[in-house]
Structures are given as structure tokens and as C-alpha cells.
């Protein structure tokens, strides 16, 4: 069985502290949990505002998980690791409970 590659798209608006933090957090989580199985595409809406419509982006930063389906979205700087991992379905809610 081949592992599928996670396709993640991070929408930002310029190099704001929140955008930089979101990208940094995302890379860290991916390296820890999806090493070698992910692809991150960063879209700066200041440069390409027309791309916001396709994924219905209303706030930035917003992370969109394109693959695996279903599409999932997380808004914010991604600083809450557990919320991001559960939101992206990388870990289940049960496995994230402290013992």
C-alpha cells in the first residue's frame, strides 16, 4: 500500500507575523508527523488575490488540506499543535488525550 502525499495549501497576505508563524508551525508539524509525505503550497493573496475565491478564503492565514479528501480548513497562526493535527485528521481526538 503506498502512502499518499498530503497536499496542503497555506493562504497568507504578505509576510505578517501571523503568516510567518503559521508557515513555521505548519512545517514543524509536517516534519514531525508527515515526514516525506507532504507538499506545502503557499499562496500570498497580496500577489494573487483571485486565488482566494477557489477555496473560499475569507480570513488569513488559512490552511487548506486538499488531499486527502475531504477538504479541511484551519484559520489562524496554527500555534495550537493539537488543534491543527486533529483538524487535519493527522491524529484522532482519542490519541491526543493525555494519559
Image (cartoon, rainbow, N blue to C red):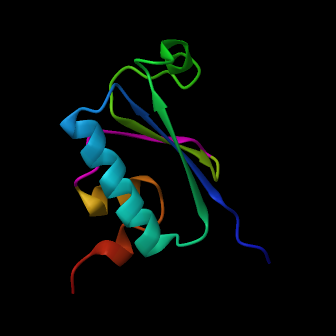
**Residue 16, how many percent across, how many down?**
23, 32
Q: Is residue 78 magenta?
A: yes
**Relative height, residue 17 to residue 33 (above, below):** above
- Residue lying at the far top in this picture: please name it: 50
**Relative height, residue 93 to residue 65 (above, below):** below
Q: Quadrant of residue 84?
A: bottom left
Query: Residue at left 29%, top 63%?
Result: 82
**Residue 42, how many percent across, how many down?**
48, 39
Q: Quadrant of residue 30?
A: bottom left
**Relative height, residue 96 to residue 76 (above, below):** below
Dominant SS type (magenta): loop
Q: Quick check: can you spot residue 6?
A: yes
Q: Is residue 66 magenta?
A: no
Q: Quick check: can you spot residue 91?
A: no
Stretch of the chain drawn in magenta: 70-79
Query: Residue at left 45%, top 70%?
Result: 31
Front residue (pair 49, 4): 49
**Residue 70, how many percent across, how many down?**
61, 45
Amino acid at each position: 500500500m503506498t502512502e499518499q502525499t498530503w497536499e496542503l495549501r497555506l493562504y497568507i497576505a504578505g509576510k505578517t507575523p501571523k503568516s510567518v508563524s503559521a508557515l513555521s508551525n505548519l512545517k514543524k508539524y509536517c516534519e514531525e508527523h508527515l515526514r516525506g509525505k507532504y507538499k506545502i503550497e503557499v499562496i500570498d493573496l497580496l500577489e494573487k488575490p483571485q486565488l482566494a475565491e477557489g477555496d473560499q478564503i475569507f480570513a488569513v492565514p488559512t490552511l487548506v488540506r486538499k488531499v486527502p479528501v475531504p477538504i479541511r480548513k484551519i484559520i489562524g497562526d496554527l500555534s495550537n499543535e493539537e488543534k491543527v493535527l486533529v483538524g487535519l485528521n493527522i491524529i484522532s481526538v482519542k490519541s491526543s488525550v493525555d494519559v
